[in-house]
Image (cartoon, rainbow, N blue to C red):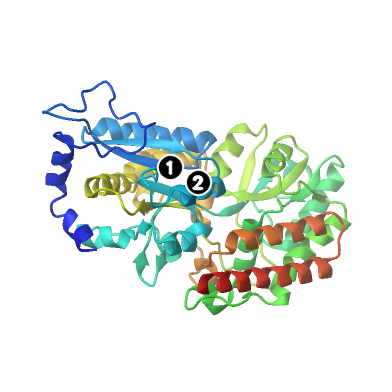
Amino acid sequence: MKKLMMFLAIGLVLLLAACAGGESTSGDGNQNSGSDKNSHSEEKSGPQVVTFWHSMGGAGQEALNTIVDDFNKSQEEIQVNAEYQGTYDESLTKFNAVAGTDSAPTMIQTFEIGTMSMINSGNIIPIQELVDADGYDMSGLEENIINYYSLDGKFYSMPFNSSTPVMYYNKDAFTAAGLDPETPPATYEEVEAAGKAIAKSNPEMKGFALQAYGWLWEQLLANQGALLLNNDNGRSETPTEIGWTEEEGKSIFEWVKRMVDDGTFANYGTNGDNMVAGFLAGDVSMFLQSSASARDVIDNAPFEVGIAFLPHPENKEREGVVIGGASLWMIDGKPEAETKAAWEFMKYLQTPEVQAKWHVGTGYFAINPAAYEEQLVIDAHAEKPQLRVTVDQLQATESSFATQGALMDMLPQGRKVMETALESVYNGGSVDEAYTTAVDQFNKAIEQANKARTK
């Protein structure tokens, strides 16, 4: 700790020393850190290399690579190597296999439900230490994003790619069914009614689709003001059981079951790509998915796409959404100059200019809301006002333990439990049986995680 607090004060000296010769502090062998240069040069051995593991694919990877390239070209002291490691789950598995060794990255992107696993690993430097030592101001970041990633007023990771689910809908299909395309459904019941009207006007089109994805189920729960875990979603004490009531939990299953029974539900199971493809092909008129998909969906649809807030039961007030996506973690055990260089890159990513490019290029939120005042974003929102709806939903979210999100290391397992339960209902299974089984398995996962941690 003492060393960490000291290094920022002498960071420039260390950085120059690292670049002026002597021992190389670049990471593993597949890094391209200027191999054409003489590593024993008395004048300079090359820039400080930062190995950045990430899980961005498609448009997200293209946008990230551009940002990394821009950073590398903006100065000569630091070379960031962005390395794709597969999905969040795959990346976390790889990290756990090399944590504490020279093969570990300098920094890693990990999804939000991996927060407690990273904290408990003992292999990270809480970025609060870097924030405090550098006098860096985190207060300007988006409030509802801060609410998720701040634990007891302390930041363990740097927020980066944040998203929430929204409802996508086919405005042309709404018009054809005699519905107002500018007034999308706000409640479960309104979604059902719209789905029936659309299916009646076009028998080839289903009304609504919901991927069997635990994240979406959690969001529909939070939008009712319900907790996923007890003890304030694990934010006051370690959870011991589920936090939602039977009414809250069953309402989602019952909603889907009604649409399955009336023939307006499109069952894509756990395959989100097929669901989006079905929407673009005109097979279904509404679906829920991450706001990070907004740009791709809007650009590829042969019809006008609408984006709306997440629906809620009509007997509940809308509470809002929980931040999804991922954050950036600083890995412990690296040379101080390498950590310093990674911290400079993390700060670069939060600037309004960079966040503007990230938001417009992907659909993810700007972590720094000052980005929304950049001309790039103003022009993009004028051209595609749907992008603004995703921001409005986040900023209209009521801050509570429900919308701050849950913290526990068993959450990936819990998501799988809910996905199995949803698929059962999609395929005609009993709501009562699927729900009871899911609650039992979820509570057992919590119990097992607590036992494993105390061994």
Q: Circle 2 sits on which residue? A: 94
Of residue 451 and residue 393, the one placed in the foreground of this image is 451
Spot occupied by residue 374 in the image (x, y as percentages of width and height): 35, 43
Q: Circle 1 sits on which residue? A: 53
Rendered position, 442 above or below 177: below
Spot occupied by residue 246 in the image (x, y as percentages of width and height): 72, 76
Picture mark count: 2
Spot occupied by residue 451 in the image (x, y as percentages of width and height): 57, 73
Image point 33% across, 39% down: which residue? 27
Left or right of residue 376, residue 235 in this image = right
Find numbered disc 2 in the image and state the secondary structure of the residue it sits on.
Answer: helix
Spot occupied by residue 326 in the image (x, y as percentages of width and height): 47, 52
The image quarter in which residue 443 lies = bottom right
Of residue 435 and residue 414, the one placed in the foreground of this image is 414
Type of residue at label 2? Lys
| Residue 155 visible, this orientation | yes
Find numbered disc 1 in the image and state the secondary structure of the residue it sits on.
Answer: strand
| Residue contact at pointers 2 and 1, CB within 8 angstroms | yes
Q: Nearer the viewer, mark 2 or mark 1?
A: 2
Left or right of residue 39, residue 326 in this image = right
Q: Earlier in the sequence, mark 2 or mark 1?
A: 1
